Image: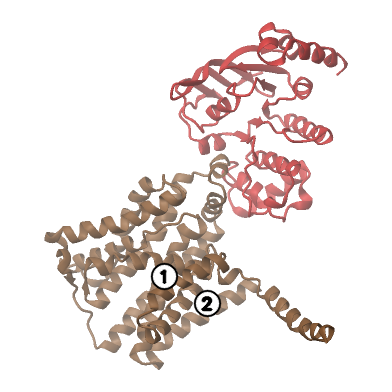
Chain colours: A brown, B red
């Protein structure tokens, strides 16, 4: 029953986002695209960071490679949709091969290693000028149609990727794979001992965490029409996505979607109202999360919270009586 | 009786430290074997070598006729070589049932999660933990955690079970319960190798004893012969203790 309610809420949320091109102005559609895009990446990250418990910071590497693979494919005459598919597959293969190496690291070492991947891919991209245009960036063939149609198209493609990612996470959560990943996150040695092939399970999780980011990157590149290394391989992006998942609830199905939605909306408010301070506020949110919401918004016992609050309110008058 | 496990000249060194030195022995299917030796003798290392946790430096491990010297830990589990840890290793935030189901699903090769849950339920009944099936593993006290380890290993449908100090930290009545359980497991046809410090326990349960000292196998044979072996007395038991154990073991 509770699950039914949750998934109903998810469906409603998707419908609301999907309805923006029909009802709202361009700014709102942009925010909706942002939400769909970050939600898909957050759901992706959840495979490795949530289910498996490996704090990966390579999201921006996958996103950036997706941008460049898609853009380069298109510039070499590959049709739009095929270029997106190519970028997705390219990133998946890259992640699988990289995972076989980097997943030997654990804990903090893995986190540092994975963040180094972002800088490494950025440096390679900006140095390999003959292929990628280096620091000058790349122009990507523009999508056909008027701005309204283009943003609607981008939104629906991003939403489709989000839905596929979400369905995949439901499937993984209920399957043998998900069970094994949870075992790994709780106690990797014990998982090995009960017969979980930890290496290949981790590689699958890492690849799943990459593949949707690659797809999102390719679509993003087509949407904005111009990419450069600093924008595509942004350290801020690589931090934001895990923060969103932690905000919502790592390892849960809806947590990443909730977290991404809340985060993007908050960010819009802060950008609009505190232009100078928004980065500091992002830092503040991270600190708040670590101290007060280590399990995310979804794991708060709202009923207990409500009860405590009611008790406090109920107690207050009595104390006044005593003291008088 | 058929042979289930054979070690041929197995050695393991960590850097310059030879932890297990040229150990060879052969175990029959259905036996309960005690493995004893002083602290640091290499008992746990030997278990780690048999279950693929550490690679061998030299030698061979043959399990059920197959050379498994180069296996990974998860492959050992799937072959039917299960173990428990000296320090229990549960999945703390999963329920007791899910812990055991993990064993069934991966080590036991059960087809689906549901099937694994059903099998796990049976094993929990077998070890007497059915009542706490839905509580998180981290909430169990030590004796029950040890039982959980056993249930988890049993769900893997092992042919061979290595028990690394399952009785450490238990009181006398808890040990009696654990021993009864080990006998019940043996009755299912599982070969058991048990590492144990309590001589009374080893003597009462083992059909054969292996003694490790400084990484070398210094004695093996039936319990009574082994405790009289002068080398074993000197290395491990001490002469006074040996005499006492001998006297006690006549009453057992």
Residue placed most toward the observer, A17 or B235:
B235
Residue placed most toward the observer, B60 or B158:
B60
Residue at position x 22%, y 82% in the image: A144
**Residue A12 numbered mark, or none:** none
In the rendered image, is residue A109 in sight?
A: yes
Label 1 sits on a secondary structure element that is: helix
* Residue A111: quarter of image: bottom left
Q: CA gap, disc 1 to disc 2? A: 13 Å
Q: Residue furthest top?
A: B230
Residue at position x 69%, y 17% in the image: B209
Asked if residue B231 lies left or right of residue A287, the reply is right
User: Residue A132: x, y in percent?
Assistant: 17, 63
Residue at position x 41%, y 49% in the image: A109
Quarter of the picture holding the N terminus of chain A: bottom right
User: Residue A57: x, y in percent?
Assistant: 39, 59
In the rendered image, is residue A293 in sight?
A: no
Chain letter for mark 1:
A
Residue at position x 70%, y 7% in the image: B229
User: CB atoms at circles 1 and 2 under 8 Å apart?
Assistant: no
Quarter of the picture holding the C terminus of chain A: bottom right
Q: Residue furthest front?
A: A324
Label 2 sits on a secondary structure element that is: helix
User: Residue A201: x, y in percent?
Assistant: 47, 49
**Residue A10 numbered mark, or none:** 2
Total number of numbered discs in the rendering: 2
To which residue does mark 1 refer?
A40
* Residue B143: quarter of image: top right
Question: Is residue A91 depicted above or below A322 in this figure?
Answer: above
Question: Is residue A49 depicted above or below B129 in this figure?
Answer: below
User: Residue A53: x, y in percent?
Assistant: 50, 55
């Amino acid at each position: 029953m509770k699950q039914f309610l949750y998934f109903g809420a998810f469906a409603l949320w998707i419908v609301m986002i999907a309805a923006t091109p029909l009802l709202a102005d361009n700014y709102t559609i942009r925010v909706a695209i942002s939400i769909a895009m970050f939600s898909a990446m957050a759901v992706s990250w959840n495979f490795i960071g949530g289910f498996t418990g490996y704090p990966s910071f390579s999201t921006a590497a996958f996103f950036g490679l997706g941008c460049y693979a898609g853009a380069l494919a298109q510039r070499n005459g590959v049709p739009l949709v095929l270029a997106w598919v190519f970028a997705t597959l390219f990133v998946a293969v890259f992640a699988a091969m990289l995972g076989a190496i980097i997943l030997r690291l654990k804990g903090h070492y893995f986190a540092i290693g994975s963040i180094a991947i972002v800088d490494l891919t950025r440096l390679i991209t900006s140095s390999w000028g003959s292929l990628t245009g280096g620091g000058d960036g790349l122009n990507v063939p523009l999508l056909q149609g008027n701005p309204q149609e283009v943003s609607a198209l981008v939104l629906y493609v991003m939403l489709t990727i989000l839905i596929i990612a979400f369905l995949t996470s439901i499937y993984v959560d209920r399957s043998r794979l998900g069970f094994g990943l949870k075992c790994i996150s709780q106690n990797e040695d014990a998982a090995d001992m009960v017969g979980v092939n930890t290496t290949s399970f981790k590689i699958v999780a890492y690849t799943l965490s990459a593949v949707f980011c690659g797809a999102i990157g390719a679509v993003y590149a087509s949407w904005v029409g111009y990419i450069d290394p600093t924008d595509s391989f942004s350290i801020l992006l690589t931090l934001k996505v895990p923060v969103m998942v932690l905000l919502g609830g790592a390892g849960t199905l809806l947590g990443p979607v909730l977290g991404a939605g809340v985060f993007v909306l908050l960010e819009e408010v802060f950008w609009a109202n505190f232009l100078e301070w928004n980065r500091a506020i992002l830092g503040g949110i991270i600190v708040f999360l670590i101290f007060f919401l280590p399990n995310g918004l979804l794991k708060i016992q709202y009923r207990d919270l409500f009860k405590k609050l009611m008790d406090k309110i109920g107690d207050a008058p009595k104390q006044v009586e005593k003291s008088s | 009786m058929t042979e289930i496990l054979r070690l041929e000249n197995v050695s393991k060194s960590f850097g310059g430290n030879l932890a297990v030195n040229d150990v060879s022995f052969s175990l029959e299917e259905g036996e309960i074997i005690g493995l004893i030796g002083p602290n640091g003798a290499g008992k746990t290392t030997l278990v780690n070598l048999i279950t693929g946790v550490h690679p061998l430096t030299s030698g061979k491990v043959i399990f059920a006729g197959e050379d498994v010297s180069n296996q990974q830990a998860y492959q050992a589990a799937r072959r039917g070589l299960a173990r428990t840890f000296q320090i229990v290793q549960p999945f703390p935030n999963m329920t007791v049932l899910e812990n055991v189901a993990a064993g069934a699903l991966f080590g036991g090769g059960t087809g689906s999660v549901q099937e694994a849950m059903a099998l796990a339920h049976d094993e929990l009944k077998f070890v007497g933990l059915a009542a706490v099936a839905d509580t998180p593993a981290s909430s169990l006290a030590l004796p029950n955690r040890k039982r959980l380890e056993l249930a988890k290993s049993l769900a893997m449908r092992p042919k061979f079970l290595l028990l690394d100090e399952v009785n450490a930290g238990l009181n006398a009545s808890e040990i009696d319960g654990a021993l009864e359980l080990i006998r019940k497991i043996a009755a299912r046809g599982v070969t058991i190798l048990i590492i144990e410090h309590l001589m009374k326990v080893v003597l009462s349960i083992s059909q054969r004893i292996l003694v490790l000292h400084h990484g070398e196998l210094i004695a093996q044979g039936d319990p009574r012969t082994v405790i009289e072996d002068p080398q074993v007395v000197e290395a491990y038991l001490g002469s006074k203790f040996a005499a006492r154990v001998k006297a006690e073991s006549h009453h057992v």
